[in-house]
Image (cartoon, rainbow, N blue to C red):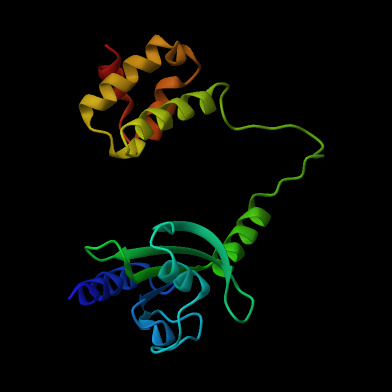
Amino acid sequence: MLLEQIKQVADGLAKTFAPFCEIVVHDLLDPSHAVLAIHNNLSGREVGDPATELGLARIMDPEFEQVIANYPNCFPDGRQVKSTSIGIKDSEGRYIAALCMNIDLTVFQGFQGMLNQFVDIQVDAPAKETFDPAGAEAIRARIDQFAARLATTPRALKAADRRILVKELKGAGLLDLRRAMEIVAAHLGVSRASVYSYAK
């Protein structure tokens, strides 16, 4: 019954993180045929394949770490992987299963490479130029920090929170900077009139 529930969890995770994350359910009570289910198959394994070294270690030691997150791994063809393995115990504290997630990093590394190339700038440009008024970066950083404290984004802040934020900016002297109101309004996605009203 527990294994069936774990298979449902695996199915949900697989649908959420497809196609970049392989989800595998291991039955540790049958180590020679441990792979019970595999979704978004990236490793080429099949249902009925044996347990991995990690699975065998759990079988041998009930005190083995239950959650091992974000460890480096690789697929048989050499692709780099970020893996997380969660051991599942029965009521007596024995490992009976494992839920494993393997994320193929090659796609994200490709994105990262393209982004790095795109944002690369020439440091020896003949003249320095900026379209941003002095202090704009500090204002945006302070807004981002405020939103992060509330586990949200600047544009998702509620009106009451925006009012508190603007008073914080005012108290820090950031509203005295050139075009401050315009910068705040743009970053919050509201009108300048709204920012002025919050600052009163």
One can see residue 58 in this view? yes
> In the displayed structure, would residue 23 be above or below residue 49?
above
Give the quadrant of residue 160.
top left
Above or below residue 82? Residue 166 is: above
Q: Is residue 46 left or right of residue 53?
A: left
Q: Position of residue 132 (x, y in %)?
A: 57, 30
Residue at 26 percent of width and 71 percent of height: 6
Q: Position of residue 39 (x, y in %)?
A: 37, 79
Q: Residue at x 44, y 87 (%)?
A: 49
Image coords of residue 104 (percent x, y): 52, 70
The residue positioned 24% from the left and 63% from the top of the image is: 92
Corner quadrant of residue 180: top left
Q: Nearer the viewer, residue 29 or 148?
A: 29
Q: How many marks?
A: 0
- Relative depth, front residue between 63 and 45: 63
Quadrant of the rendering where the C terminus is positioned: top left
Residue drawn at (78%, 40%) of the image: 123
State the quadrant of the N terminus: bottom left
Residue 73, position as x, y percentages in the image:
57, 67
Toward which corner of the image does residue 193 lie, by quadrant?
A: top left
Tell me if I can see residue 20 in this picture. Answer: no
Viewed as shown, does residue 174 lie left or right of 152? Answer: right
As drawn, is 82 to the left or to the right of 163?
Answer: right
Q: Can you name the residue that lies furthest to the left here?
A: 1
Task: Establish if 163 lies above or below 140.
Answer: above
